[in-house]
């Protein structure tokens, strides 16, 4: 490894990985400020919500700053295969165009994403073996085995001429993870003896006391619960948790049930796991049509949709409009998952749909059928005892998680701490940790098949439509600027006590439009923009009085 020059710096830049839940894009830069070389660690997404981002499926970190550094980006290194760590790769890679490195299971899922985006043959993707090493310019990276809720979770030991950075990725301490090895404690102690400059560490469960529990304990309880069920059984869990998928398959066999996978993600993860040699001892699954021929007591459906996603398999089953799978009184749905903050309304609606059909529900509130994949406080304390970093840099979670993690690190006598925000350029060395700059950061929305800014007109209008409804006015004007038809008014998303009241409201809006046109000068009546502006303002004012809302008002002028 080269000796550092006097003006070399080691910096850390979160652009989608601190102060939030569900998105990761972190960069490490080394060298003088005008010629830094960068590696990107993870490039993930979070998911849109109908109440705040209607019509938006995915939300990505804005890579504008790194795009300007594209010639100096050496690599994109992925820690594991969760969507909040790999989901943005297919969308953002054309703007970054750096080689990608991942372990086999992660690489298998990344290939599917790249194929969907037509990038499979364009992106240089290199598989790294578990516990492998990379040499990338001034960076030497060791993949360190951890445990999490997905196969092949890796922390990254990033060595530079100015020190070792330990990037944990997502992790927990599970003494019996069922799939994969346990945490490589010996490697962590070895790194600590070498000296860890900074630890960039998961904060998601910092408020949770104790430990999170083991997948092996969930297996025992879930097998017991399924064995007591009658009728048809549906289990929903995060598809990426292959150990949990395997548990459901084993539990089905123990209960004399044949498993059936329902949902695209469940099939995708199942086949990716099979492809790297996992799930070899699990019972074979059948398709939905075959499952429909089995007695109720002999089938188990393993479904996507534990978070109430409206287009996921479980939501369609709950509403009774799934093509092949139906549940009714006497059947049971088991939620082997947690409620992700922000999804409470959707999940409770899902519960109500099932309960109205007489379906029994079993959740993690009732039985020990789920454990988190993130470290609780005792596990965080253990990691700090193993790693002994000079600097603590909490990431992952919301601002309150980051701040609480800083307090915990300080209580553990970590010499230096910093609470980063997205866009903070943080110098790790030389000298004490410091915020040295702020760079542009933000969000991009996936709206259908295109990327848009959060303030895009279409997104703003969609929010207005959802909250305040819409009013449409159409009028026809002849060559002499006289109104010969209309104004005709229609409304969407606005209500009145009865039809008669609505008719009166529409008449009021029509009168407002007519009065606005009548006030226009002769010159303005020749200008469609002037007509539309005047009518829009007048109708909006009347609509505010009628509904106490500010609906979106659209005016159409037809010239005859």
Image (tube, helix red, strand yellow):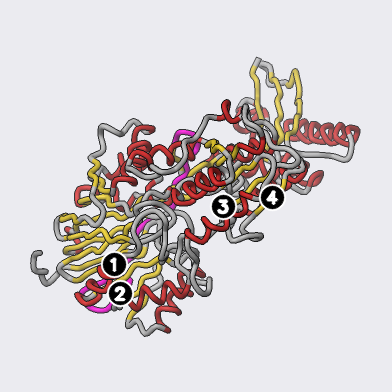
Question: What crowding class fits label 4: few (fewer than 14 Cα within 10 Å), some (14-19), or many (20 or more)?
Answer: some
Q: Is residue 288 visible?
A: yes
Q: Identify the residue at horizontal 37%, vertical 40% (top origin).
A: 274
Residue 352 in the figure: left or right of residue 110: right
Kindly identify which residue carries mark 2: 387
Kindly identify which residue carries mark 4: 361
Number of the front mark, 3 or 1:
3
Query: In this picture, which residue range is highlighted in magenta?
Result: 428-450
Check the picture and name the quadrant holding the C terminus: top right
Q: Is the C-beta separation of discs 2 and 1 under 8 Å?
A: yes
Counting from the top left corner in percent of width and height, residue 378 is at 45, 75
Q: Earlier in the sequence, mark 2 or mark 1?
A: 1
Q: Earlier in the sequence, mark 4 or mark 3?
A: 3
Q: Is residue 288 above or below residue 393?
A: above
Counting from the top left corner in percent of width and height, residue 28 is at 26, 61
Number of the front mark, 2 or 4:
4
Q: Earlier in the sequence, mark 2 or mark 3?
A: 3
Q: Is the C-beta separation of discs 3 and 1 under 8 Å?
A: no
Number of the front mark, 4 or 1:
4
Question: What crowding class fits label 1: few (fewer than 14 Cα within 10 Å), some (14-19), or many (20 or more)?
Answer: many
Front-lying residue, 31 or 519: 31
Check the picture and name the quadrant holding the N terminus: bottom left
Picture quadrant where residue 559 is located: top right
Kindly identify which residue carries mark 3: 223
Q: Earlier in the sequence, mark 2 or mark 4?
A: 4
Q: Is residue 433 magenta?
A: yes
Q: Identify the residue at horizontal 49%, vertical 35% (top origin).
A: 285
Label 1 secondary element: strand
């Amino acid at each position: 490894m080269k000796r550092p020059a006097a003006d070399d710096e080691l910096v850390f830049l979160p652009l989608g990985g601190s102060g939030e839940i569900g998105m990761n894009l972190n960069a490490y830069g080394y060298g003088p400020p005008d010629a830094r070389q960068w590696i990107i660690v993870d490039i993930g997404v979070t998911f849109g919500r109908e109440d705040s981002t209607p019509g938006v499926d995915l939300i990505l970190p804005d890579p504008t700053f790194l795009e300007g550094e594209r010639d100096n980006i050496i690599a994109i290194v992925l820690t594991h295969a969760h969507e909040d760590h790999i989901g943005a790769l297919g969308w953002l890679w054309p703007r970054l165009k750096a080689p990608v490195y991942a372990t086999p299971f992660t690489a298998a899922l990344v290939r599917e994403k790249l194929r969907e985006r037509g990038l499979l043959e364009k992106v240089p993707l290199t598989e790294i073996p578990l516990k492998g090493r990379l040499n990338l310019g001034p960076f030497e990276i060791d993949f360190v085995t951890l445990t999490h809720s997905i196969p092949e979770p890796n922390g990254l030991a990033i060595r530079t001429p100015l020190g070792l950075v330990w990037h944990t990725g997502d992790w927990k301490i599970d003494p019996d993870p069922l799939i994969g090895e346990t945490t490589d404690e010996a490697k962590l102690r070895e790194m600590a003896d070498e000296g860890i400059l900074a630890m960039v560490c998961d904060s998601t469960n910092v408020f949770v006391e104790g430990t999170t529990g083991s997948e092996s304990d969930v297996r025992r309880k879930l097998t017991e619960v399924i064995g007591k069920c009658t009728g048809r059984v549906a289990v929903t869990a995060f598809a990426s948790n292959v150990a949990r998928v395997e548990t459901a398959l084993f539990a089905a066999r123990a209960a004399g049930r044949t498993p059936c996978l329902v949902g695209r993600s469940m099939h995708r993860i199942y086949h990716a796991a099979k492809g790297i040699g996992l799930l070899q001892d699990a019972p074979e699954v059948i398709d939905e049509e075959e499952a429909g021929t089995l007695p109720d007591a002999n089938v188990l459906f393993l479904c996507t949709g534990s978070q109430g996603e409206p287009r996921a398999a479980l939501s369609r089953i709950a509403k009774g409009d799934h093509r092949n799978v139906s549940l009714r009184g006497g059947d049971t749905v088991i939620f082997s998952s947690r409620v992700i903050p922000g999804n409470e309304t959707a999940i409770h609606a899902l519960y109500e749909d099932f309960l109205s059909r007489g379906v029994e529900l079993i959740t993690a509130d009732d039985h020990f059928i789920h454990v988190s994949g993130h470290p609780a406080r005792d596990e965080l304390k253990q990691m700090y005892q193993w790693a002994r970093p000079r600097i603590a840099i909490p990431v992952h979670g919301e601002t309150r998680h980051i701040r609480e993690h800083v307090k915990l690190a300080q209580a553990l006598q970590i010499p230096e701490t910093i609470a980063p925000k997205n866009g903070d350029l943080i110098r790790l060395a030389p000298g004490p940790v410091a915020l040295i700059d702020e760079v542009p950061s933000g969000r991009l929305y996936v709206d259908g098949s295109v990327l848009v800014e959060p303030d895009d007109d279409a997104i703003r209008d969609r929010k207005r439509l959802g909250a305040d409804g819409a009013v449409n006015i159409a009028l026809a004007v002849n060559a002499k600027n006289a109104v010969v038809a209309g104004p005709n008014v229609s409304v969407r998303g606005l209500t009145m006590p009865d039809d008669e009241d609505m008719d009166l409201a529409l008449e009021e809006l029509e009168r407002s439009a007519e009065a606005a046109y009548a006030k226009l000068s002769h010159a303005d009546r020749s200008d469609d923009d002037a007509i539309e502006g005047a009518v829009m303002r007048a109708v909006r004012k009347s609509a505010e009085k009628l509904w106490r809302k500010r609906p979106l008002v659209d005016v159409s002028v037809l010239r005859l």
